[in-house]
Amino acid sequence: MRIFIAVLVLIFSLQSFTKADDIRDFEIEGMSIGDSLLDYYNKKKIENSKRNYFKNQRKYYVVGISNNLENYEVVDIYLKTGDSNYIIRTIAGLITTNLKDCLAKKKEITKEFDKMFGNLLPNDVVKPHEFDISGKSKQYQRVYFFGNGEKNDNHIRIECDNWTKEIKDKHKFTDGLNIVAMTTEILDWIYSDYK
């Protein structure tokens, strides 16, 4: 029930947006790409919230915030290593749910996003998740591209992640709904194999 209420709050909170012309116009938990994370959290909180996705230091890293959120269970924020201003490069809101419920919620949110991003090129895709080298974990996405619809264009997406049992057991991942504001900067890093 809590997840259902959170999604309703999420949907209704999105209705106040006008048409978004720039990815920086979109907010997740009041934060936008280009904002300083220091406007929301102190350095200690940021440093203590780093996700340990990689064993060695990379060009970017991810901070996971999971307390005092209104619409999401977790917000993942991508930051550039060495950036003393902690500028948000990409941001994602996450809600744990099973695939069936996620797809239903994705459909509801898509209706609102179609209004909000009516000026953007949408694309629906089901694809293997890049993290799972077996290709068995899937992502069900609706992507709104700022640009020509190239794979590395800035975009907003709604996605349902459906992980295999092996990935869930090994990495403690959960299936869920994600709302992501993704930048070309981070996409280029991802496509470079996170180097």
Image (cartoon, helix red, strand yellow):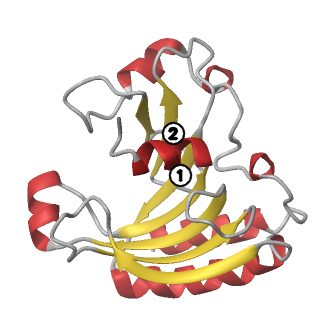
Q: Residue at x 63, y 26 (%)?
A: 87
Q: Residue at x 45, y 53 (%)?
A: 73
Camera-side residue: 120 or 163?
A: 120
Callout 2 crowding tier (Cα within 10 Å): few <14, some 14–19, many ≥20: many
Expressed as whole percent of the image width and height from the top left, the position of residue 147 reads: 75, 62
Q: Is residue 89 above or below residue 154?
A: above
Q: Seen in the image, is 141 located left or right of residue 161?
A: right
Camera-side residue: 98 or 166?
A: 166
The residue to which callout 2 is attached is 77
Q: Seen in the image, is 119 located left or right of residue 194?
A: right
Camera-side residue: 72 or 111?
A: 111
The residue to which callout 1 is attached is 92
Q: Residue at x 38, y 28 (%)?
A: 49
Q: Residue furthest right?
A: 18
Mark 2: secondary structure: strand
Mark 1: secondary structure: strand
Expressed as whole percent of the image width and height from the top left, the position of residue 158 reads: 56, 70
Q: Quadrant of the C terminus?
A: top left
Hey, what amino acid is under mark 2? Answer: Ile
Residue 165, located in which quarter of the rendered image? bottom left
Q: Residue at x 42, y 36 (%)?
A: 62
Expressed as whole percent of the image width and height from the top left, the position of residue 188 reads: 50, 46
Callout 1 crowding tier (Cα within 10 Å): few <14, some 14–19, many ≥20: many
As measured in the structure, the alpha-carbon distance from the residue carrying label 1 to the one carrying label 2 is: 7 Å
Q: Give the number of the disc on residue 114.
A: none
Residue 69, located in which quarter of the rendered image? top right
Q: Quadrant of the N terminus?
A: bottom left
1 and 2 marks in contact (CB < 8 Å)? yes
